[in-house]
Amino acid sequence: MASNAILSLLLAILSLASYHTIATDPGILQDFCVADNSSTSFVNGNLCKNPSLVTADDFFYAGLARAGNTTNQLGSVVTPAFVQQFPGANTLGNSMARIDFAPYGVNPPHTHPRASEILTVLKGELIVGFVTSNPDYKLFTKIIHEGEMYVFPQGLVHFQINIGKNNAVALAALSSQNPGVVRVANAAFGSNPSIIPIVLEKAFQLDENIVRMLQAKFSAVNN
């Protein structure tokens, strides 16, 4: 009798564990989702087009065939092929981007909160790198050339810079249809509304006047 009770308890525990495994939350595909408690439906990502209205063009995107305009302060430009530009990628868990670099142009430190990234150099040579999380903050960096690849783990700060005298081009493959992009400097100094200066003064060990100058610069860039 006691053994039957123990067996029943074990089966109940296994059943509960299995239920929680099946019922885990899906991976988030956007920064947040505010609940509409009056609605009986919800979505985490993008709603689906009626299948009867889908055409071959929904699975086609030519945007990466064109070079981007690098005449800006960074000397680089990213052309994304995320779900917003490439509807056919929705729910498939991948996307791409083209990065064009002017000589010595930089794709500044940034993160993709929802994706890892594999970068392939199509033209030129780049210094690339990423920084590990607290407490080590270790930098992994390398020069990569045409046809070579580098991988950036999900959520870690990473960057690329063209070290050649000619234009460079890279192609990035990302593990989410909506990977998100958070540029470190833009987020810290260009948020809307602005972070109170004393926070940034202490975080970056900067004078208040420099913080306010950077906030003005990056607020203008973001807007």
Image (cartoon, helix red, strand yellow):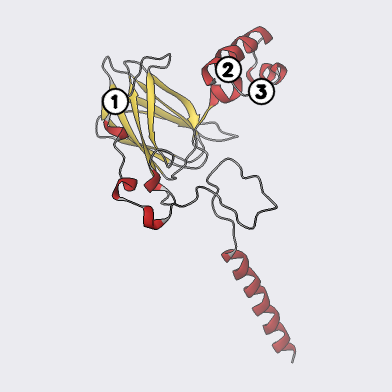
Rendered residue at 48%/26% (across/down): 109
The kind of residue tagged 2 is Ser
Q: Is residue 139 visible?
A: no
Whether pointer 3 and pointer 2 mark residues with C-beta atoms closer than 8 Å, the reply is: no
Vertical order, 133 against 27 (above or below): above
Residue 158 location (% of width, % of height): 46, 30
Label for residue 193?
3
Mark 2 element type: helix
Mark 1 element type: loop
Q: Compare marks 1 and 3 and give the one earlier in the sequence.
A: 1
Label for residue 67?
1
- Position of the C terminus, as image quadrant, is top right
Residue 193 location (% of width, % of height): 66, 23
Tell me the residue that label 2 is attached to.
219
Q: CA distance from mark 1 to mark 3?
A: 34 Å
- Position of the N terminus, as image quadrant, is bottom right
The kind of residue tagged 3 is Pro
Mark 3 element type: loop
Badge 2 crowding class, 10 Å Cα cut-off, few under 14, some 14 to 19, many 20 or more, is some
Vertical order, 114 against 147 (above or below): below
Q: Residue furthest right?
A: 2
